[in-house]
Image (tube, rainbow, N blue to C red):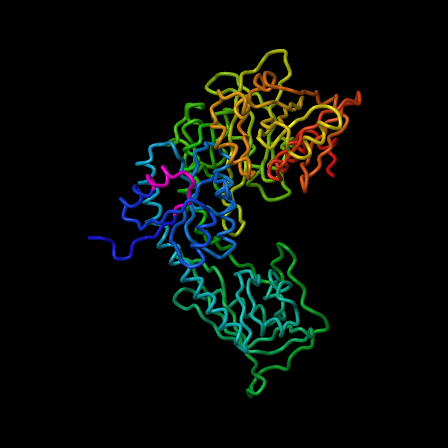
Amino acid sequence: MPDPDPISILCVDDEPLFLDAFQQLLEREGFLVTTVAGVSEALELLNSEYFDVISADYAMPEMDGLSFLREVRSRGCESLFIIVTARRLAHISIDAINAGADFYLQKGTDMTTEIRKLSAFIRKSVPEKIAGREIKEWEKFYKSVVESQGEIILRINPDGTITFVNEAGVKFFNTPYEDLLNKNFFSRIPDEDRREVMAHLQDLSTVNPEALFEHRIVDGSRKPDLRQWSYHGFFASGGALSQYQVSGREISRIIRVGVKEPVQIEGPAEEPAAGSTAAVPEIPPQPEPQREEDTNWSGLVDTIRTIDTPVFAVDRKGVIIAWNKAIAELTGVSPDVMLGKGEQEYAVPFYGKPVPMLIDQIIAPPGTVPVGLPSSIRKVGDTFIGEVENVKIQGKPMLLWGKGSPVFDSRGGLIAAVESITVGEPQPGKEVEEYLGGISSITLKVSGEGVGGAIAGAIGSATGGFGIYATNKRLFVIQNPELNPAGGSGGVQFGAFMMDELFGTTVDTRQKSIADLEKFRVFEAEKEQIDKLDLKKPVLLSGYLTITLKDKSSFRIYIDHKKAFGHIEQLIRLFSPENLKIE
């Protein structure tokens, strides 16, 4: 029997053959599939029609998949989003996840198997998304009701931290909403009332979650105001208190019998000092409710499995959630042994014991450095880069170099970290030259000497296909043979690559060996030889990087697109920030 309400999927890809095959595979799984060959057509369709799932190719001439994803999300669309790509690059998968993608599909693999995984993910995730939207709609309705109430309504954590207050509460405390958040509600209750209130609150349970009090609280005029307060406790599945909802109502017209006159308080109640239990009775610490994103690792884990370089990932508590085939082959330790382990067990295959690695810096609280971790880790954007280290892997001396990135959820919260491992064999008696990174692009050009050559470069008529790369010792400009229109023997179809580059959507960021950099170089400079590095951003004409040496000679490479400029700026900041000047 056909599904009476099939899941709808919009597929966007500029390769007709792939799009047709992808549609057939998805339709065999019972999905209702619509295909378009361009982003403009897709955006126009999304103006009038909703799809449960959207899939998009990473490299498209009109707009790349990540830019399309950001545009879709900016419109408030919450459909599942799948990034599809033929490139096995770790940064693409991490960028996709951080941009809000839900799944990452690799072209050129066993597509039948991959489609089965994707189908299972869609059938599980679409109902969850629908349920999530219904909850959000209910929350909007709830908030509109709460805001319209004359009563004061707050949400507070077990320790009294305010997480929400309605408009009536803002007026009562005479304090802006943002300033009330994270303040302590209990600290505004006079001491003698607070002790009794806290004693009764500790008696709340899942069976008896409510308590009604009349107690004083310091209002916006710094005076204690007697009101009736209702407390309702919310409890996690294990019975632990997670939050209170508190509502307060004005009771001045009620005749109270046996209630003492309010005690005048000269100043505002002070916030309890950190760690102090004198003002507020100690409440047993409550386990933090686990966020849904923390356990939904399917997209991230599946992505890491497809990467050819050694990669592993941990959650924000340091527990291993992914250990791909390449790192298993490198270390001789299988995923079955590593998954689920914490306490820095991921370091054992490299150092022989649990010790901090670069990935620990990524999940550490901001501004802190884990004990025992080298302070030489560099941070460029969201990428953390370590120094080359001497280790033993399966008993063999090796050089290890780690690079890592955080993974964020849709709200910008850290949920995981990913580290990729590069290894090499040590060369006795020779100082290690460390590869830092680089890019090649059709939009990167060099030109001849003199004014004529400078004009040719500035208007974009010089031959492109060059690249800028750096090690910790040298800066290279190379002519990439795979992007050379005159070569023809490279592994990249020049026509397709040219179309991508025409719109600035593609750069080659694959790692190059130092031997290849030396082989294809058109310019090279030792770090110590460089006097200054001038970067000019492309606006109307091409931008450029001018490398000026201490002997006053110079070399210039032209940059036609802002995306390439961003890569180069990041690379130069990593290579020699002290010599960088940006116009």
**Where's residue 352, x and y in %?**
50, 24
At 40% from the left and 64% from the top, the residue drawn is 206
In this view, which residue lies farthest toward the left?
1
Q: Is residue 13 magenta?
A: yes
376 in the magenta segment? no
Which residue is more in the foreground, 340 or 259?
340
Q: Nearer the viewer, residue 306 or 41?
A: 41
Q: In which quarter of the image is the C terminus?
A: top right
Quadrant of the image occupied by residue 553: top right
Is residue 239 among what the camera can see? no
Q: In this view, does 324 lie above or below 137?
A: above
Report the residue at 65% width, 57% height from top.
Answer: 273
In the drawing, does residue 30 fall left or right of residue 373?
Answer: left
Position above or below: 430 against 542: above
Please state the horizontal and vertical placement of residue 243, each as a whole percent of the image. 49, 62
Q: How many labels does the image show?
A: 0
At 37% from the left and 47% from the top, the residue drawn is 35
Provide residue 229's location: percent of width, then percent of height: 53, 75
- Magenta region, residue range: 11-22
Answer above or below: position of 104 versus 247.
above
Residue 181 shown left or right of residue 549 in the figure: left
